[in-house]
Image (cartoon, rainbow, N blue to C red):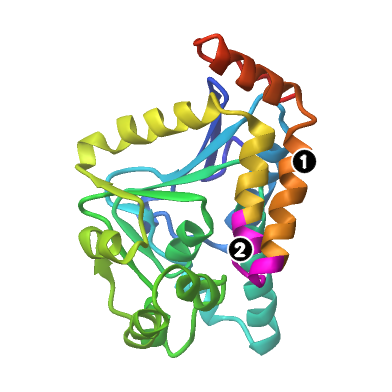
Amino acid sequence: MSNTPIRMETVNQVCHITIDRQDKLNALNRAMIGELDQAFEQAANEASVRVVVLTGAGPKAFIAGADIAELQGLDAAGAAAASRQGQALTLRIQHLGKPVIAAVNGFALGGGCEMALACTLRIASSNAMLGLPEIKLGVLPGYGGTQRLSRLIPRGLAMEMALTGDPIDAERALQLGLVNRVVAPEELGATVKALADKLAASAPTAMRCIMDAINRGADSDLEAGLDLESGYFGEVFGTEDMREGTSAFLEKRAPRFTGR
């Protein structure tokens, strides 16, 4: 993906997807959303990739939002199409089948916050700011923000964030459960790397099943969720990784998972 703001690099089974449009605080336009969709599709299909890390280049922004100049020119039909495109990307991230870690460095606003919400885990630097400011433009979040935020934090607080458009800082996001950890800006890279490496050493099929059971089960009643869990429990027992994991435990050694 040379000559685009989207960079991809895979190191030790971890695919790093970086948005590098620092002059615009890594704001997303529709072309970039299409390129990100292709990047995540590629990461999903590459067996050598077990974990994805998404971040923005530079210290100021993860993704500061959507490209407002581009959005201003849309009519109602074009806006609905842009929303569906963004939602398709966030759904791909959420259901990638591999953990996606958002390394939130600085502003994660609007579409940037929605991208982070779709990720499996969110690690924020202490200077991060997260929010859905669309109301201040006379619009609303269109990439899944109205739906995912209220599934992660209490509905009343989600309402307040979306209706006021006011961002929250990293510590408040941690208190609400919107992010998993907050670290000093200089520690963000090392913290995310350690977490990604740990996940990359885990059993891929079991990780996929855990993520899907939690994601889909959260939107089901308890009995349907338990049925889903039982099905996945049976699936992982048919893998070589399950045999390796149980053998390693009994032999008091570290397991070596192969993804089979």
Left or right: where does residue 208 sit relative to residue 248? right
Q: With respect to residue 136, does 247 lie above or below?
A: above
Mark 2 residue type: Arg
Q: Label 1 sits on what residue type?
A: Gly
Q: Position of residue 251 (x, y in %)?
A: 55, 9
Q: Does the magenta run of residues contain 221?
A: yes
- Kindly identify which numbered label has been placed on residue 95: none
- Pick the front one: 89 or 251: 251
Residue at the spot x=61%, y=59% of the render?
215
Task: Check disc 1: other Cα within 10 Å, few if <14, some if 14-19, many if 20+.
Answer: few
Query: Quarter holding the N terminus?
Result: top right
Tell me the residue at 46%/32% (across/down).
196
Above or below, comparing residue 246 to residue 159 in the picture: above
Cα distance in 3D space between marks 2 and 1: 41 Å
Q: Residues within 10 Å of mark 2 (few under 14, many from 20)?
A: some
Coordinates of residue 112 in the picture (x, y in percent): 44, 61
Q: Are marks 2 and 1 in contact (CB under 8 Å)?
A: no
Question: Label 2 belongs to which residue?
Answer: 30
- Inspect this view and state whether residue 97 appears: no
Q: Is residue 192 left or right of residue 252?
A: left
Query: Is 15 on the left-hand or right-hand side of 178?
Result: right
Magenta stretch bounds: 214-223
Label located before the other in sequence (2 or 1): 2
Secondary element at tag 1: helix
Quadrant of the rendering where the C terminus is positioned: top right
Determine the residue positioned at 51% across, 10% down: 253
Residue 114: image location, x then y, percent: 49, 65
Identify the residue under disc 1.
234
The answer to which of 132 and 173 lies nearer the viewer is 173
